[in-house]
Every structure is written in C-alpha cells, then in structure tokens.
Amino acid sequence: MRTWKQGLLLGTLALAVLAGCGKKEEAAGAAAQAGPADAGVLHVYNWSDYIAEDTVPNFEKESGVKVTYGVFDSNEVLEAKLLAGSSGFDVVVPSLQFLGRQIQAGVFQPLDKARLKNYAGLDPELMKRIAVQDPGNEYGIPYLWGTTGIGYNVDKLTAAFGGTEVAASWDLVFKPENIARLKDCGVMMLDTPTELVPIALNYLGEDPNSTDPAVIQKGADLLKTIRPYIQTFHSSQYIDALANGSACLVVGWSGDILQARDRAAEAGNGVKVAYSIPKEGTPLFVDMLAIPKDAKNLDNAYAFIDYLLRPEVAAANSNYVSYPNPVPASLPSVEQAIREDPTIYPPPEVAAKLFTLAIIPPEVDRIYTRLWTELKTGR
C-alpha cells in the first residue's frame, strides 16, 4: 500500500520534462552479436555504495550464477567504457539522461520484457516519464532514484552560522562569503560537470539544460568564484568523509549523504550528518538498468534484473542505501523512517521544484569537459 507521500511525489514526477529519443534494434540481431556466453556467470557494473550487502550473495545462492560486480562513481566513467565497445558487462546502470544518448549511440539492446515477470510491478507514472527519453521503455528499467543536494555536518554548520537554516538554500554553496566559513573543515563536490553546472545555472535563474555556450559559461563562472574553497572533487569519497568528520559540506547525492549519516551513527563517533534539498530546486535523477549490445550472458542478465524488481529485494535495497525504488508493492517493507523522510520522498511543494537533466549533445559535452578541466585545475 502506497503512503500519501509516495502517491503525491509520483504525481509531481508527471511535471518533469524529459527530453530525448531512441532507435530500435532487433533483439535477435543483438543477441547474435553478443557471442558465446559463460555458463553461470554475470558481469554487473553499478554505482558504488548502491546495493544492499546481501542482494548479490542471495541472488548467487538462489540462481547458482557467479556475479562479477564492478563499481564506478560517475556517468562519464561508465559512458567511456560503453562507447569504447566490448565492455564485457552484462548489466550496467546509467542515469536516465545518459541512457538516452547512449540509446542514440546504439550501445544497448532492446529488452525482451516477456523475460521479466516482475516488469508489471513497476510504477506506471514513473515509466511514462522515463519513456520520453526511452521511447516505449524499450531499453531501460528503473533501479533507484533520488536528488542531488547539500550534505553537511550539523555541529560545524551551527558553529559557523549559529544554526542550520542556511542549508535550505544554495546560497550556502554559491555565495563565497558563506562557503568560505567552511573551508577549513572540508568542502567536497561531485566530480561531474553535467550536474554541477546545471545546478549553478538553475540557481542563477537560467535554464539548467541550456545548450547555449554563453549560458553554460555563466554556470562555470559561478563555480569558479567558489573554487578556492573546494577541497576535493569526487563522486564517492565524500560518504566516508562526511561520516568520519573530515568533511563538513558536500554537494552530493541524497542516498549517499544519508548513508554517511547512518555510518556516523553506527560508529558512535559523535558526528551528526544531515541532508537538504535547497529551496531553489535541484536535479531529480533516475538510474536505469540496461543490457549492453555485446552482453554475452543474457539469461543471467534478465534473471538478475528480474530479481531486483521483486518487492522484497527492492525494499531491501532502499532500506540499505536510502534511495527510493520504482516498485510500489515494496513500500510496506520499506522502513517507516525512510518512507516518511521528506529528504528521500520530498513533499509536493519541494518535488515541484525538482528538475530532470536532458540529453547532452556531443558538442555541448565537449564544452562541459573543457570548462570542468579548467575549473578543477584552476587554469
């Protein structure tokens, strides 16, 4: 049974505008190109810290399949491997806007939905929104979703500002006089221009998905003003840094920051971590399960994806990583503290300001890469 918060949030997802297109490939042809399979083997490439500890072992025990499980911490790393070809992976987990342009590049094979008995349990409203970038939901299955926002050390923020109210706005990050107060206790940001620049643009009142080089430059220029106060750009190290107190401010992903909160609590180290969705708005992302065109272990790939769609498995993953899943039937098994956390399931007024990230054309991606290199190196 879905709580009122989940129902309202999925309703607000219908407001999100997702852009993209895809092309169909024949499943039989893709399978023929995949080559011989290794019996009882599966190669999975997923985000770091993004699955319950027992999910893969339980799947291996039930299926008899040996899973080789690799991790990455940015869409750019995954995309480079996929576009190079012969990745060796059977299941990968790109974010939706990257899935959209990778579909255009022809790196995935269409799904045989008849092989996914739990497919019918996916939330129809979410699937409808995803279909704008993945027409007909031909290539991807939603795995987990979340937001990008501000993670902070409660005590250090209070010491610097007299309270934590400042974390409700991107002013904390983008006003040099604010972020400068936290320089000495550690500031970290995601190492991904495709999220940080759109966030900066949205804060400036610009279209976060603009492809205009002059507009994109505005976002980069804003980030340059705060560059002296950023200690590290990394897309996974901030979890432990927040948890152990070596970072006090991060721009990161919702579930990761909540994992840091829980790790600190479990360690009993006195570090208090919190997460904020800034009032100006922030990206909402959906991470997708997809099968590369050259995947060799198709039977095992479908078995693993279908396993992840079981309500009890989806709930276990949400409970462990603090990200919402796309299976409504899982909600009774999702911990109440997660179901009712407004930073995980944002209320309607917050969700209304969330925005999705559009597919980035290659020429714009090159601009992002150049500007990001300049930002990180200070050149």
Image (spheres, rainbow, N blue to C red):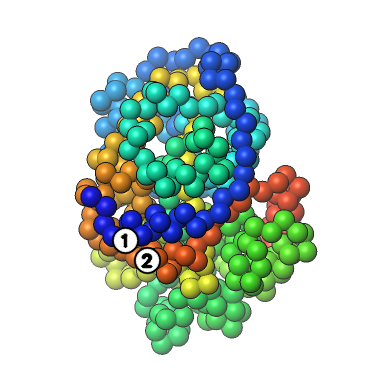
In this view, 231 is above or below 172: above
Q: Position of residue 377 (x, y in %)?
A: 70, 60
User: Residue at image x 43%, y 68%?
Assistant: 350
Q: Residue furthest bottom?
A: 162
User: Residue at image x 44%, y 43%?
Assistant: 127
Please give the residue where the numbered disc 2 appears in the rendered image: 347
In this view, 120 is above or below 327: above
Q: Secondary structure at mark 2?
A: loop
Q: Which mark is residue 5?
A: 1
Q: Quadrant of residue 362?
A: top right
Q: Position of residue 189 (x, y in %)?
A: 54, 62
Tell me which numbered mark, 1 or 2, is placed earlier along the sequence. Answer: 1
Is 375 positioned to the left or the right of 256 in the image? right
Q: CA distance from mark 1 to mark 2?
A: 6 Å
Q: Quadrant of residue 108?
A: top right
Q: Quadrant of residue 76?
A: top right
User: Residue at image x 72%, y 62%?
Assistant: 216
Tell me, yes or no, whether the two marked residues, 1 and 2, touch with CB atoms within 8 Å: yes
Residue kind at label 2, given as amino acid type:
Pro
Any part of residue 251 in sight: no
Q: Position of residue 186 (x, y in %)?
A: 50, 70
Q: Residues within 10 Å of mark 2 (few under 14, many from 20)?
A: some
Q: Which mark is residue 378?
A: none
Q: Secondary structure at mark 1?
A: helix
In this view, 329 is above or below 299: below
